Amino acid sequence: MTEARLLICDYSYHTVAYSNNYKSGLTTYLFRLQTEGSCYANCNGIDYHIQAGDLLLLKPGDEYELRVSEEQSAGRVSSGDYYIFCDGAWIDSWWKRAERHTLNHISIDEHVLGLWRQLLLEKRRWPEEDTELIGYLLRSLCLYLDRTITETKRTDRSTFTALRLKRFIEEHATVTFKLEEAASHVGLSLSRAVQLFKACYGKTMIQYALEIRLNAAVERIKYSSMTLEEIAETCGFASYSYFHRVFRAKYGMSPVKFREAETRPARPFQL
């Protein structure tokens, strides 16, 4: 079997300043998808402002530095991402199939996140991880990223403007923002922005922001040790009581019960 090795796969969320660097050059491939907030990266001497929906693709030998620092939103730090370190003959072959840009703007969807999350969970099964399954999941993610990059490039101007609105919401959903700010960001009036977003995505900007906040909360409930009150605050909810209410309406249980269900050991199968 042609090799595709997953070395590291994880999710990170930063609420305080953070930095790391590989100035001597990466030894493997690195894929990094920003899912919320923003940060800064320097890749091979070029500075990038990374926002939600931005995908970094780096190869062995590339220089890489990441910086998460205070943003404009009242000096608050907020940055969430999935990342992968991988190598192998199949990855080498895939990389050479197309011209690879360091920074790629993509539309985040559940297919991409689903594959990434499954890789993360399988990797956490170490040392019982299924390397064959991981290899196929990694190949699938690479191929799906190619499709997503291509489809994003094909969008027309109106669709791309709606996509920029979507990214603005994804970046700012976990902090306080006004719809007027989103409209101004893409150069539209508020009424036109609201109309365009609803036409393209079938939901209002407020509904989408709430989805992002709830999804972020689920990520932190599952993969972090933050208290539920901290999760509510860092996901953009004005109060824990409001967070509790909308979470229960969405998932049919309270955040407390949801966390208990996620951490409860599986019951042994009995004949």
Image (cartoon, rainbow, N blue to C red):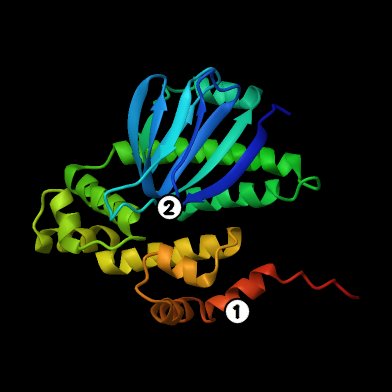
Left or right of 13 in this view: 137: right
Q: How many neighbours does mark 2 have within 10 angstroms: few (below 14), some (14-19), or many (20 or more)?
A: few
Q: Position of residue 40 (x, y in %)?
A: 37, 36
What is the number of the mark on residue 168?
A: none
Q: Quadrant of the C terminus?
A: bottom right
Circle nearer the viewer, 1 or 2: 1
Q: Which residue is mark 2?
A: 109
- At a point 56% along the width and 20% down the height, the residue shown is 60
Residue 153 seen anywhere in this rendered image of the structure: yes
Task: Look at the numbered disc 2 and give the secondary structure of its residue.
Answer: loop
- Disc 1, disc 2: CB below 8 Å? no
Task: Look at the numbered disc 1 and give the secondary structure of its residue.
Answer: helix
Q: Residue furthest right?
A: 271
Q: Is residue 55 above or below residue 89?
A: below
Q: Is residue 265 above or below residue 253?
A: above
Q: Which residue is mark 1?
A: 257
Left or right of 19 in this view: 49: left
Q: Nearer the viewer, residue 11 or 86?
A: 11
Q: How many marks?
A: 2
Q: Quadrant of the N terminus?
A: top right
Q: Nearer the viewer, residue 263 or 75?
A: 75
* Amino acid type of the residue that numbered disc 1 sits on in the rendered structure: Lys
- Ranked by sequence position, the earlier of labels 1 and 2 is 2
Q: How many neighbours does mark 1 have within 10 angstroms: few (below 14), some (14-19), or many (20 or more)?
A: few
Q: Position of residue 89 (x, y in %)?
A: 65, 22
Q: Is residue 152 above or below residue 180?
A: above
Q: Position of residue 192 (x, y in %)?
A: 11, 59
- At a point 21% along the width and 42% down the height, the residue shown is 156
Left or right of 257 in this view: 186: left
Q: Position of residue 57 (x, y in %)?
A: 46, 30
